[in-house]
Image (tube, helix red, strand yellow):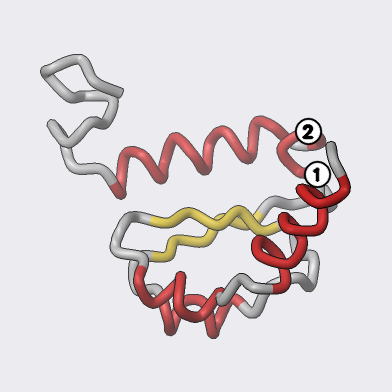
Amino acid sequence: MPRHVAISAWENGFFGWDTAVAATACGAPFLYTDAGTPNVDLDRLAALCPTLLVGRTVGAGHFHQLEVPDQVNAMIDRFVAVALPRGAGGRDDPAGRS
């Protein structure tokens, strides 16, 4: 990518990102799959975002979706079942949306 695009992405998308503001504004169901890597303060995130659900994988690192996909997929399935009420676009939506 062009240098100016890369620099802009880092400046605005990484350094300029305010996680607290985004988490506080989040009203949608939010699933965080955690592999135990120390890259987020889950207690603070839960305090800022009451819709947060956390799933923790076992026996994997940062790329847990590749290392233990059965665990991650089960978490996503459970999240969809719990966080999306029937008829709201979830798997059991009679309109067929998913």
Q: Position of residue 98 (x, y in %)?
A: 30, 23
Q: Position of residue 19 (x, y in %)?
A: 56, 74
Tell me which amino acid carries mark 1. Answer: Phe
* Residue placed most toward the observer, 23 or 11: 11
Q: Quadrant of residue 34?
A: bottom right
Asked if residue 38 can be seen in this view, the reply is: yes
Tell me which amino acid carries mark 2. Answer: Leu
Classify 10 Å Cα crowding around label 2: few (below 14), some (14-19), many (20 and above).
few
* Residue at 81% from the left image edge and 51% from the top image edge: 4
Question: Looking at the rendering, in which quadrant would you find the N terminus?
Answer: top right
Q: Is residue 96 left or right of residue 19?
A: left
Q: Is 30 situated above or below 80? A: below
Mark 1 secondary-structure assignment: loop
Q: Is residue 51 left or right of residue 48?
A: left
The residue identified by callout 1 is 63
The residue identified by callout 2 is 66
